[in-house]
Every structure is written in structure tokens, then in C-alpha cells.
Amino acid sequence: MLLPQPRAPKRTLFEEVPELNTIWTPELSATAALHTKSWEDHDSRTESGEVLVAYVNGQPVGVTGWYLMGDNEAGLRWHGVLPPHRRKGYSRIMIELACKRLPSSIRKVYECTRNPKSIAAFRACGFEVLTDPEIMAQARQHAEYDLEGTGQVLCKRLY
């Protein structure tokens, strides 16, 4: 089950669910927490999307979210599965459920990552690695961390 997290909580998402800090390296977890806090603090009229925590039997298994990039495009926001719950199909389910929450006009969902294992996992979920420099630049401008070097932009077509 994916549960949306409220905007402007008393505690940040990564304080509320500290297990989320184990998804990425400490550096990326700190960046994810900072960007999520910044997003939580924004006025919902000017900042699109959601942050969602996935739970199974009341226990958190991961986090995902989305934001609008245009009229028919969206990006995933800090998608990840807790280490003990990886390779169980949760990432695919989380992506499917998050995509169902998108506005009906969205036709493409982008993900930016520099982790080779994540690239393989997203490809298994129907994402394609992009090579068009213009589209990659557009998606990277929305990325919440530096993608220099090994960073890849992936796209999943919804319809």
C-alpha cells in the first residue's frame, strides 16, 4: 500500500520513517532528506506531486513520489526500496501505483539515476535508457542531485 505523506509535517519524512535513510548512501540519503523537506515546505499550489511511502503489513518497504515536468510528463521523486525488501517486486508495484496517481494527461515518466543496479531495475520495470541529448537535458534539469559522469535518464511511456 502506498500512503501519501502530508505536506509540512511536524517532523520530516526521513525523521518520521528513519529506515528510509538506509536506501541510499549517507550522502544521497542526506540529499534526499533535504530535497524532500524543501518540497514538503513548498506551497502545494506552486509545487506539484506527492511523496509516498510504501508499507507491507504495517512496515515501510520504500519510498517513491512524483512531480510534474510539463503538461504530459512527470518525474519520479526519490524512488527506492529498503535493502531487506529488495528483489521482491516492490519497486515495480510502487511504480505502478504511483503512475496510477498521476494526472490522466501524463504520458511519460522520467527517472534520473547514476546507480547501475537501479538502471537495470528500472529497465525491468519498462523504462528505456534515453540517448536524445535534448530530452536528457530537460529531465536532468529537474533531477534533485548531480548526474554528472555515470548518470542516466530513463523514460517509461504510459500510453
Image: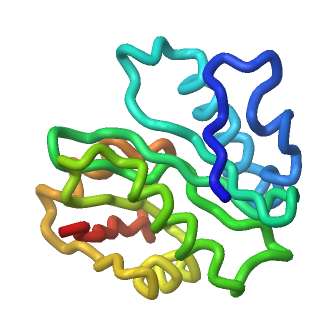
Q: Position of residue 125 (x, y in %)?
A: 44, 81
Chosen colour scheme: rainbow
Q: Quadrant of the N terminus?
A: bottom right
98 vs 62, left or right, is left
Q: Position of residue 148 (x, y in %)?
A: 42, 58
- Foreground residue, 154 or 62? 62
Residue 87 to residue 130: above or below: below
Residue 19 to residue 44: above or below: below
- Foreground residue, 93 or 43? 93
Q: Position of residue 57 (x, y in %)?
A: 85, 64
Residue 28 to residue 25: above or below: above
95 vs 21, left or right, is left
Image mark count: 0
Residue at 64%, 62% (x, y): give it: 80
128 vs 95, left or right, is left
Q: Quadrant of the C terminus?
A: bottom left
Residue at 58%, 82% (x, y): give it: 117
Q: Quadrant of residue 112?
A: bottom left
Q: Quadrant of residue 118?
A: bottom right
Q: Position of residue 110 (x, y in %)?
A: 33, 59
Residue at 30%, 48% (x, y): give it: 74
